[in-house]
Image (spheres, rainbow, N blue to C red):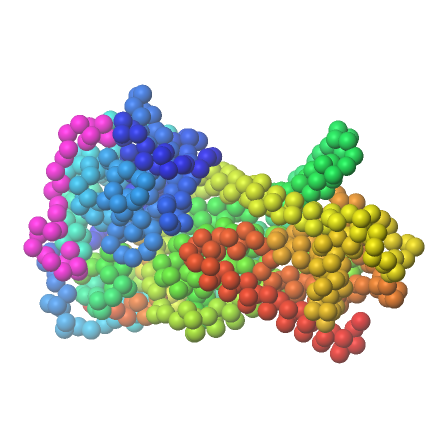
Amino acid sequence: MSTAILPGAAPAANLSSGIKLSAIEPGTTVRVVSVSGGGAISRRLLEMGVVPGVTVRVVKTAPFGDPFEVRLLGYNMALRKSEAELVEVIA
Amino acid sequence: MQVATKSELSAEPSVTIVALAGNPNAGKTTLFNFLTGLKQKVANYPGVTVEWRSGSWRPDGSDRLIIDLPGLYSLETTSIDESIARDVLKGEMPGVRRPDVIVAVVDATNLERNLYLVTQLFEFGIPVVVALTMIDLFEKRKHQINLKRMSQLLGVPVVVMNAAKSRGGNELADAVASVLERPVSFPFHTETDGTEDENGRIFARYNFISNVVQESVVHNDRDAHRVSEKIDKVLTHRFFGIVVLFAILLLVFQTIFTWASLPMELLEKGFGWLGDAIRHEIPEGILADLVVDGIVAGVGGVLIFLPQILLLFLFISILEDTGYMARAAFLLDKVMSRAGLHGKAFLPLMSSFACAIPGIMATRTIENTRDRFATIMIAPLMSCSARLPVYTLMIGAFFTGQTIFGVLSLGAVLMLAMYLLGITVAIVVAFILKRTILKAEPSPFIMELPPYRLPNLRTIIQNMYTRAWLFVKRAGTVILAISIVLWALMYFPRSEDAFAGTGETEIAANVTPETMQLQNSYAGRLGHAIEPVIQPLGFDWKIGVALIASFAAREVLVSTLSIIYNVGKDEDEESETLIGAVRNAKRPDGTLVWTPLTALSLMVFFVLAMQCMSTVAIVRRETNSWRWPLFMIGYMTALAYVGSLITYQAGRLLGFE
């Protein structure tokens, strides 16, 4: 729950490092840089708290390799790999 | 349980309307049950089929009506639930007065995301009270919260609730009364922030929340609450997770069949006794026949399934309440998405094993309309409990006592095969639908995996009660009407009249008057009329009569066969007399009507056919058009005919009779 949201962290300001959340190994904790795409999926991600500055821990992958489970803001969330591709993170 | 009428929705102006809003899994239902007790009503919002519950809450003599909004993460996306909640809060829902107060249910262990919805609720200009739930869990984790500070920062009263222990009701009542007296101004408005774009508004809300939480909560960072993740080490394990899932499903179905059998027998005996008692009281004649053979036999035959329905909803409620259902969706999403379905379709489809009606109603959690319609279209292919008596009768008559490899009972294997046939065909149909008429972009899967919790007994009982009541109501209306119609079709015209001029020659000496009556009734004539069509499936006109009858409701097949074979109307699918009659039934040429192959063909027909008026009605309501239910009847009937045809003809080619 130790989440400090970086004040004023605008998505456009962090285009430099480009790791996708979908590529992160289980057990790793990362910080959200931006969420790309303007559709329903990215909005839902943002509303569920996947906003720049939030730390996300990748918990595990489902039995058939997809979807996978992450932990953020004190709760656990499942999302598909294709959805996690929209989220850019830094270690 | 009553259904609210329109005038009750709007409530008198003197009654304060309190809207209960909160995230799914935040403890909203438990709080609602605690505040309203059993004084609740379930109804549908006008025009849409989202159920809503309301109940009166009378703290200190004041009169308040609580409206339970659907569980929401946000008010800005496009699911039906969210647009309904928005309409209610804007006062734009026809027949529902705009709420006077919003009680925002907030899970203390999950503050940030829960408060996100609260910041949206601020924007409706309705006074808000925050009710913190799960506080015992929160404190167990050694977190601390400064309620006064949080209330200051949010600008609204914050009340701690423990609904499970009936704590906090008075405090909530006081807080609601206080915001009604003097409206509060909220500290937070995104419109005035200068941030125009949508993402900016979301960031602004989370920034605001982050400040509130940092200033009012001291979190114990040791993260000592990994119990759920530890449980998930097994339950969502890539191998054991699947094993446990199937073990749970097996256990559920096994228990439903074994536990339900005793109460089902008792119910059946009860209806048999009731029929006899009525026969005794009412003088012999058309009225007694109508009441006993039409109404008691028809409605009773359906009410017998009540124990099974109750047990299934017991298990579904427990699985949902504990948080396991979300894990099942997580485990199966990949497989389901191959067929073009959403992981969330798992629950509706599983419910459909009891009855497609609650299953179809449960598809409302699927946000994408096309995903939802695809799920609705295949839900009736899941073998529901009404098919069970048919399978049981057929297996009982032709496949008992036989084993495969010496250990597996052939009956059990066939039963499983029928379930698997339904599932397989459903997957294929979904696959085709999602690539043709219901083609769509994949909808988001993003969902919470809530922490495991002990189920709340009250919520479970309430859920079972609601579902059972819906089922009983159906038995009392649709099934009652159908039973009377069917009875009339088989009762008229009376043979005495019918025989006067027809000069029937087919009557053999061993035919009873009842069979004669049936043969010459309207139903019998219909059966004869369709005989050429169903002959390639291995069915004769008598089975045709039973098929016609069962298009209204599948379970009617058993009672119709009992009437056709004249074995007494209160016989059930396990009855030795009915089984004997089916085994020995002969065609006019002396050959047996039923063979194991005929039975198998009939079972396949029942797996695939759309034989349920109530399902048709509910699909009409849920899709808001006749197009979908008609399509459903069409494709399922075609499938059933072809499936049954292939079974019978292929069986004969292989040398079976």
Magenta range: B175-201
B481 displayed left or right of B200: right
B388 displayed left or right of B499: left
B605 displayed left or right of B198: right
- Quarter of the figure with residue B260: top right
Extreme residue toward the front, this view: B501
Extreme residue toward the top, this view: B61
Residue drawn at (17%, 59%) of the image: B198
Which residue is at the front of the view, B630 or B333? B630
Image coordinates for residue B610, horizontal then vertical, percent: 58, 60
Residue B386 showing in the rendered view: yes
- Quarter of the figure with residue B137: top left
Extreme residue toward the right, this view: B509
Residue drawn at (44%, 31%) of the image: B38
Image coordinates for residue A84, horizontal then vertical, percent: 29, 67
Which residue is at the front of the view, B111 or B286? B286
Which residue is at the front of the view, B621 or B269? B621
Q: Quadrant of the C terminus of chain B?
A: bottom right
Residue drawn at (69%, 47%) of the image: B488
Image coordinates for residue B496, horizontal then vertical, percent: 82, 47
Residue drawn at (56%, 53%) of the image: B613
From what the image shows, is residue B335 above or below residue B394? below
